[in-house]
């Protein structure tokens, strides 16, 4: 908003505040730092080399709540500085075209961006720069347009693996300490700086083009490595091919961490992702890492190689990453999957507009749905308009023209115009600028492209009709069958159970009142290779057939479920509410449930366990103590729930 006002005034007064990037270019950053995990402290020695573009007498480095030792030097001479707890200001008569090097010691106790987690006496330390500001733990630049070539060195207790951006220069191991250095060859924005430390193992691969891939995991998850990282190499090869520009960095590492803030984060050469995506072969069927894996990988080009200048152009990162991830998934899961995902996002965008929450794609505070899904839709529609080969060449030209720099929507569109020699005004207005998502155009395009979508649209049992029963027994797609089951679960019959995993999951989800004649078939759902299906089925069977509760509980007593232990938690709650089942062990079951609210576990497990205990009105002394602890967690959902529950319990 402020930016626009300024632009209007620009003609009359020189109102635009100069950005620091207009008069100084930071070129290289070299950080050597140490961590004191028990006191959440970071300290280090840092240097920056920079070039002055215009004469100036002061400049700053972002540094949140840091302290600096006296003796900051500029080209080896002491220099005046000021620390306002947000920035470190340096004062000197800086001369145009001169090169300088500043060197300083710093220390900080970061409240965000660097997280020290302890699980069963083991540290897992990780960072999140985007939205949290790397300058909370590393003096750096909050402005994404300042791109620097970084070098890092750090150390930690032995037995731990240190992982950072860039090429590893080699670890040195002493008896008690492990140190590691990393060097980047190209500049990047500070929000992409990353660190992960843990007791990891790794699997190493090489892509077709020779890029080293490192897939990290916790030793206890060794059997989950294959399903978790399934298709990683294939997607990498696909992405290089599809984008038409070689992977721009030296190597690519992926690291799961405990209690991550998001699904994944595309730090340059080092994607950090939530360990909720570390899955066994069964969980893979419901919630795997494939989409997040592809999305973060695509960001290595869209976001990391070319970075949106400001929030207004955020879709150049998220829209592109979403679309290219979808293309990689199409290569694996097929066309129907691809069109289904586009169809699904078009529905969501439409209902967002109906609820008056939609906005232009260029609105800096647009919803994630808009940035990600509408952004992806722009590219899909654009490809249709200018043709696949023009699209590919335009994207390639755009990446090559602006590599290691920042980009705007205009710059992308001008490459599209250059390549296609077509006018884009109407397209830009409709797809990018307009507040409303052009749903009708989107649907028309999908129907033109996909018979599967045509069929899905046609099959409709919202109002029951005589064809509905036949649909369910015909050869329509699984998605269409799921739609009917959702709309009219009473149509489910014995033959419906002969469908595949996802259709059977829909039965478990929507057929909650189980007719006696379907009981036997319904019980087979407990054996499906889907933790989601088993959770629904266990609950519905327990509810519908009270006399058989012991049988259902026995059948599921050894299943944990997803990483959030969805089945184990439900099982414990059902046991505690089943009078005839193992009543002598009730206190053991209760203790186990309460234990899941403790800080030994991920936020999702704790939240679920708290919710169940709340539902049962059974949050006792230990539960309450864990509730206090949960209130200071970094996961806002857990914090919000803990605060609400605590209030209600008083
Ligand atoms: Zn993203």
Image (cartoon, helix red, strand yellow):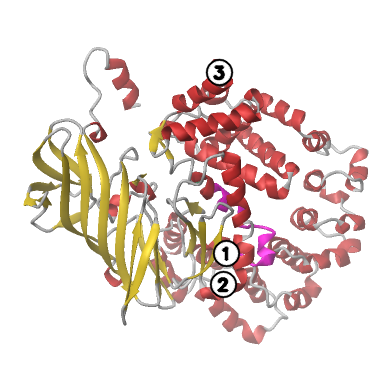
Q: Which mark is residue 221?
A: 2
> Which residue is painted at 23% across and 21% down in the image?
15
Residue 561, by quadrant, is: bottom right
Apparent side of residue 282 relative to residue 224 in the rendered image (left or right): right
Residue sitting at the far bottom: 584
Q: Earlier in the sequence, mark 2 or mark 3?
A: 2
Residue beneath disc 3 = 424
> Which residue is painted at 45% across and 24% down in the image?
410
Separation of residues labelled 2 and 3 (CA atoms): 50 Å
Please say if 438 is above or below 327.
above
Residue 61, by quadrant, is: top left
CB at mark 2 closer than 8 A to ligand 1?
no
Label 3 Cα neighbours within 10 Å, binned few <14 / some 14-19 / many ≥20: some
Separation of residues labelled 3 and 1 (CA atoms): 43 Å
Q: Which residues are magenta?
A: 279-295
Residue 311, by quadrant, is: top left
Give coordinates of residue 239: x percent, y percent.
Answer: 58, 45
CB at mark 1 closer than 8 A to ligand 1?
no
């Amino acid at each position: 908003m402020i930016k626009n006002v300024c632009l209007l005034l620009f003609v009359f007064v020189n109102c635009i505040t100069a950005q620091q990037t207009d008069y100084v270019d930071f070129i290289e950053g070299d950080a050597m730092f140490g961590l004191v995990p028990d006191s959440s402290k970071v300290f280090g020695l840092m240097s920056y080399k920079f070039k002055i573009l215009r004469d100036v007498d002061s400049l700053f480095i972002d540094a949140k709540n840091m302290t600096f030792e006296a003796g900051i030097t500029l080209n080896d001479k002491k220099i005046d500085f000021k620390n306002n707890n947000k920035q470190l200001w340096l004062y000197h008569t800086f001369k145009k075209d001169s090169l300088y090097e500043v060197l300083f010691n710093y220390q900080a106790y970061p409240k965000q961006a660097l997280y020290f987690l302890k699980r069963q006496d083991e540290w897992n330390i990780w960072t999140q720069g985007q939205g949290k500001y790397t300058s909370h733990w590393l003096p750096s630049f909050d402005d994404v347009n300042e791109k620097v070539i970084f070098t890092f060195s750090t150390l930690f207790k032995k037995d731990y693996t240190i992982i950072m951006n860039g090429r590893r220069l080699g670890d040195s191991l002493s008896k008690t300490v492990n140190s590691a250095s990393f060097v980047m060859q190209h500049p990047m924005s500070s929000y992409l700086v990353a660190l992960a430390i843990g007791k990891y193992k790794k699997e190493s691969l090489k892509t077709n083009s020779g890029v080293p891939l490192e897939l990290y995991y916790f030793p206890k998850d060794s059997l989950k490595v294959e399903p978790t990282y399934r298709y990683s190499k294939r997607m990498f090869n696909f992405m290089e091919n599809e984008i038409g520009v070689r992977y721009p960095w030296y190597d690519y590492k992926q690291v799961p961490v405990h209690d991550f803030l998001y699904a994944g984060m595309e730090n340059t050469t080092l994607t950090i992702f939530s360990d909720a995506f570390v899955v066994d072969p069964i969980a893979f069927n419901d919630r795997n890492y494939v989409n997040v894996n592809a999305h973060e990988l695509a960001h290595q080009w869209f976001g990391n190689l070319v970075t949106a200048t400001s929030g207004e152009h955020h879709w150049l990162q998220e829209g592109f990453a979403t679309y290219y991830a979808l293309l990689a998934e199409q290569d694996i899961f097929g066309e129907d999957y691809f069109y289904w995902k586009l169809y699904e996002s078009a529905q969501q965008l439409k209902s967002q507009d109906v609820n008056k929450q939609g906005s232009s794609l260029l609105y800096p505070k647009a919803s994630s749905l808009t940035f990600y899904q509408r952004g992806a839709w722009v590219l899909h529609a654009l490809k249709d308009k200018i043709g696949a080969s023009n699209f590919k060449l335009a994207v390639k030209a755009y990446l090559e023209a602006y590599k290691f720099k920042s980009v705007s929507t205009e710059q992308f569109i001008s490459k599209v115009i250059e390549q296609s020699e077509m006018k884009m005004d109407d397209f830009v207005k409709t797809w990018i600028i307009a507040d409303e998502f052009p749903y009708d155009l989107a649907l028309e395009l999908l129907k033109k492209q996909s018979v599967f979508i045509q069929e899905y649209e046609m099959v409709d049992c919202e109002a029951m009709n005589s064809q509905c029963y036949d649909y369910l027994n015909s050869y329509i797609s699984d998605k269409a069958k799921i739609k009917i089951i959702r709309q009219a679960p009473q149509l489910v019959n014995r033959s419906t159970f002969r469908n595949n995993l996802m259709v059977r999951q829909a039965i478990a989800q929507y057929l909650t009142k189980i007719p006696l004649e379907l009981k036997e078939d319904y019980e087979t759902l407990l054996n499906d290779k889907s933790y989601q299906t088993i959770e629904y089925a266990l609950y519905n069977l327990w509810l519908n057939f009270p006399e058989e509760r012991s049988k259902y509980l026995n059948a599921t007593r050894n299943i944990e479920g997803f990483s959030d232990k969805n089945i184990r938690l439900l099982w414990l709650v059902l046991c505690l509410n089943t009078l005839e089942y193992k009543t002598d062990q009730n206190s053991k079951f209760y203790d186990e449930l309460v234990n899941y609210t403790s800080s030994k576990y991920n936020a999702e497990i704790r939240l679920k366990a708290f919710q169940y205990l709340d539902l049962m009105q059974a949050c006792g002394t230990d539960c309450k103590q864990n509730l206090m602890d949960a209130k200071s967690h970094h996961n806002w959902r857990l914090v919000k729930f803990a605060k609400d529950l605590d209030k209600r319990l008083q």
